[in-house]
Amino acid sequence: MFKGNIRRKGGIVASALAAVLALSACGGSGTPAAAPADNPYGLIEPGTIRVASLGDAKPYTFTDAQGQFTGFDVELFKDVANRAGVDDVVFTGQDFSGLLAAVANGQFDVGVAAIGITDKRKETVDFSNGYLAGYLTVITTKDSGITDEKALGGKRLGVVQGTLQEAYAVKNFASANLVRFPDNNTAISAVNSGAVDAHFLDYEAAKAYQEQFGLVSAADIPSFDAPAGFAIAKGKTEFKEALDKGLAEAMEDGTWKKLYQKWFPGSPMPEQYLPKAEQTSSPTPTATK
Ligand code: SNW
């Protein structure tokens, strides 16, 4: 079969020459699709960004009635990816506890889920610049008797494994009995059934569950020193630079503000992410833990 083709093309020499030229056009690697020129960001699949996220952190990241990922972080990331030249963005739900490891070991290109930037996490992954700074919130039932953090002593407090809430509670709520959950939905079910007394999660997600189930906030703890960032595998410099550039543009042209007002209506707005002309004081430096 091969031999026959060669003969039809008019000679072994010409075919051999064509083969050599074809090989050199591939750069000799044999996998032109993975060549840096076609894949400057080092994506798993050129042209597609695979995102590890959460399905139950509304309004940051969650799945809607059709099963599509949406929320502040999701829309912001898609906008930033578009500015970086990538429109195909595929979100997948993960347990929070496995999310950073999955990014670090190359199962995903990026983690997007209100992930606070800390020095500890930077041992595993790199982060984009910060894009959100808010509170960690304890929510409970109306009749639990828990009205502030001091009342948590001896109570069963839910946390999602691997979150800053877990670390904070271990350190600061030592007299509470921590109950670790894989995700927010499971923890909130436990609050509603009385299996735990309270759950400790991000402020906006707490607000959404309060509205959904008639729960109440017992404490808001500032987490401004760990602003949320996009988590990427270490050493992907061009990807990180493209995300940071896109983020800066989205902040400066008011896209960030528009998304913040859409998803977090009525919440205090961290000024450092507004267009420079709208910042009343000098921007807060993005210090990390
Ligand atoms: O540190 C905060 C940040 O200031 C902002 O309020 C968004 O949430 C945080 O990044 C904390 N988020 C938790 C964490 O990083 C939980 C993440 C989650 O449940 N999706 O561990």
Image (cartoon, rainbow, N blue to C red):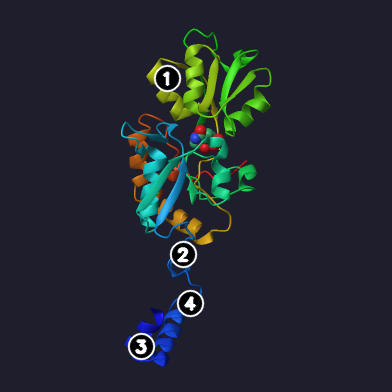
Residues packed near mark 2 inside 10 Å, few (<14), some (14 to 19) or many (20 plus): some
**Disc 4 vs disc 2: Cβ atoms closer than 8 Å?**
no
Query: Is ligand 1 closer than 8 angstroms to the Cβ of mark 2?
Result: no
- Mark number for residue 40? 2
Closer to us: 270 or 117 = 117
Q: Tell me which label, 3 or 1, sits earlier in the chain.
A: 3
Label 2 secondary element: loop
Residue 99 location in percent, x, y? 54, 41
Give the alpha-carbon distance from disc 2 to disc 1, as whole Å: 43 Å
Query: 270 and 89: which one is in front?
Result: 89
Amino acid type shown at disc 1 = Gln
Task: Describe the element under mark 1 as helix, strand or loop.
Answer: helix
Q: Which residue has dot 1 on it?
A: 210
Q: Residue at x 58, y 31 (%)?
A: 161
Classify the position of the C terminus by image quarter. Answer: top right
Question: Of tags 4 and 2, which is closer to the observer?
Answer: 4
Q: Name the residue under label 4.
A: 27
Q: Which residue is drawn at 37% across and 56% down?
A: 86
Q: Above or below — where is 33 with respect to 199?
A: below
Residue 178 left/right relative to 90: right
Distance between mark 4 and mark 3 Cα atoms = 27 Å
What label does residue 7 carry, if any?
3
Sequence-wise, the earlier of marks 4 and 3 is 3
